Image: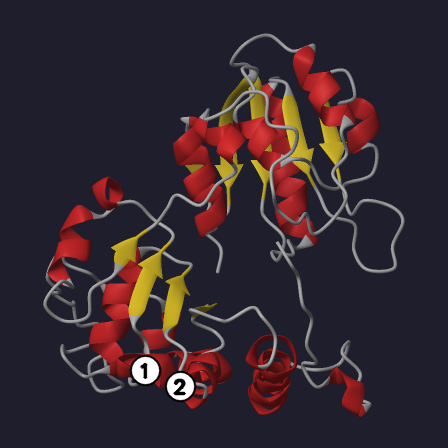
Amino acid sequence: IQVLFFSDGFGTGLDNKTITPDQYMELIGKFGPISLSNIIKDHFLNGSQKLVCIINNPFVPWVADVAANFNIPCACLWIQPCALYAIYYRFYNNLNTFPTLEDPSMNVELPGLPLLQPQDLPSFVLPSNPHGSIPKVLSSMFQHMKKLKWVLANSFHELEKEVIDSMAELCPITTVGPLVPPSLLGQDENIEGDVGIEMWKPQDSCMEWLNQQPPSSVIYVSFGSIIVLTAKQLESIARALRNSEKPFLWVVKRRDGEEALPLPEGFVEETKEKGMVVPWCPQTKVLSHPSVACFLTHCGWNSMLEAITAGTPMIAWPQW
């Protein structure tokens, strides 16, 4: 797999530590099309390699415009549940009634889905939505679906059959998932290493520790790469794990510029016989380890699919 990089606009002297998500989306929407066009011209127009398709994700809808300019078919890889795809499509194309400022508590009835109350809906479609850029990007994508030749989903048909079938006449979505490492699917025990990119270096000592634990005994706790918990939340989880008296493996990221983990004082020392705290771990290997009993998760879609594929029971604590 060849990896090519392009400028997202940070080379213009902006400080990426102070930029807001809204400013970032605006920046990449301005510089991304120019950069991607240059990559296509430099690598694929005059060389022996030809582009047969470009695949984007929902948060860079401008990729479809670039593809159209070069007459290259474009597919969108939908990286969230198909249920959300159906909700957004109907919302941004005004096909169904959703809560408004005048009636914020109304229920929503959509084909292929149970009756949805406001708290069941993504915050981007609610009148109280505090985010500016993401709805703008989603709106742009869903109102210009004709630019896409295919919509591919990181899901599988059996998991979301009713909602996938409900979109067949409107704007079909084709499942190509679960997109998880082959080792998790049990396809080949001898695979040297799964193709993928880890955001941080995993701490392999956690696998050695898991090997020492009894079967189905360990509580695995991880809240993904983005969630930042408050001191009160961390203290709550720490107390619960201590009181459970079960072995646990807890992934807690260090905060920027800090050496120490942001945990209650003395917690790691007090629980070292029972548990292990690491800044990052190889999650797919952990989920399929026979010592793991359950997974306390923030319900990120990648984590959900990995746990479903591994057959690991989940305790859900939804964030975002």
Work out whether 111 lies above or below 308: below
Whole-percent x and y of residue 284?
56, 34
What sort of colour scheme is used for the picture? Answer: secondary structure
Mark 2–mark 1 contact, CB under 8 Å? yes
Q: Residues within 10 Å of mark 1 (few under 14, many from 20)?
A: some
The residue at which mark 1 appears reads as: 147
Of callouts 2 and 1, which one flags the residue occurring earlier in the amino acid sequence? 2
**Residue 177 appears left or right of 285:** left
**Residue 27 appears left or right of 168:** right
Whole-percent x and y of residue 293?
50, 20
Work out whether 299 lies above or below 286: below
Q: Secondary structure at mark 2?
A: helix
The residue at which mark 2 appears reads as: 68
User: Looking at the image, which is closer to me, 305 or 255?
Assistant: 305
Which residue does the image show at 30% across and 85% down from the upper left?
144
Which residue does the image show at 66% across and 55% down from the upper left?
230
Which residue does the image show at 63% across and 75% down from the upper left?
43
Name the kind of residue labelled 2 in the image: Ala
Name the kind of residue labelled 1 in the image: Lys
Which image quadrant is residue 7 in? bottom right
User: Looking at the image, which is closer to me, 83 or 295?
Assistant: 83
